[in-house]
Amino acid sequence: MEMNTMALILAYLGVVMMVGLAGIASAIGTAMCGQASVGAMKKNPSAFGSYMILSALPGSQGLYGFVCFFMVQGFLAAPTMLQGAAIFGAGMLVGLVNLAASIYQAKVCSNGIVATGNGHDVMGKTLILAAFPELYAILTVAATFLISGIIK
């Protein structure tokens, strides 16, 4: 296989992981929180606003994957082998870290939703705790920015 073709395949596989896994992560995370919200609404329907905010948080990881795509898209026309490998690596990093961050953030948010449904005033504290997994997702955006600056 020609080097240019291999570089292009690596780059596009990286983009698939970057956008695809991060998007899947957000779908899983928001669905987990949505399920907890439906159950909590049975006990306390007046807290729907809190449930909605907490359910939306794991959706940010999909956005991070898309933002990272914009950082590397300029290299996708004819990448060098170094650029293809770098995009592949960034895609794996973004996809896997965001997948884990979204699922674990959803677990924190889901527990906050259940507790709020049971009448406990934990919305603000849940938001603070949910920010911790989010930090690692944000770091993947920073890493992709740095990677895309190095491979120019």
Image (spheres, helix red, strand yellow):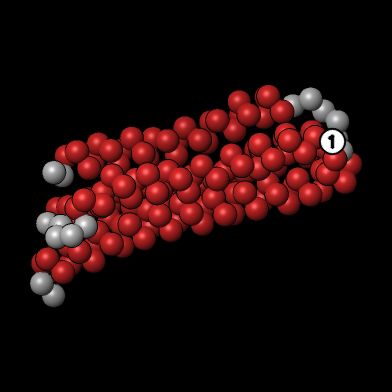
Residue 94 appears left or right of 73: right
The residue under the point 84% across, 35% down is: 46
Residue 141 against residue 14 in the figure, above or below: above
Please say whether residue 150 is visible from this viewpoint: yes
Of residue 133 and residue 53, the one placed in the foreground of this image is 53
Where does residue 82 sit, x and y in percent of width and height? 14, 53
Q: Quadrant of residue 125?
A: top right
**Residue position marked by numbered label 1 in the rendering:** 46
Q: Give the image location of residue 73, x and y in percent.
A: 26, 52
Q: Secondary structure at mark 1?
A: helix
Q: Is residue 101 visible?
A: no
Q: Residue at x 12, y 66 (%)?
A: 4
Residue 20 picture quarter: bottom left
Q: Few, some or many C-alpha atoms within 10 Å of disc 1 (few <14, some 14-19, many ≥20)?
A: few
Please indicate whether residue 124 sits to the left or right of residue 84 in the image. Answer: right
Residue sticking out furthest to the bottom: 1
Q: Is residue 27 above or below residue 115?
A: below
What's the residue type where badge 1 is placed?
A: Ser
Quadrant where the N terminus is found in the figure: bottom left
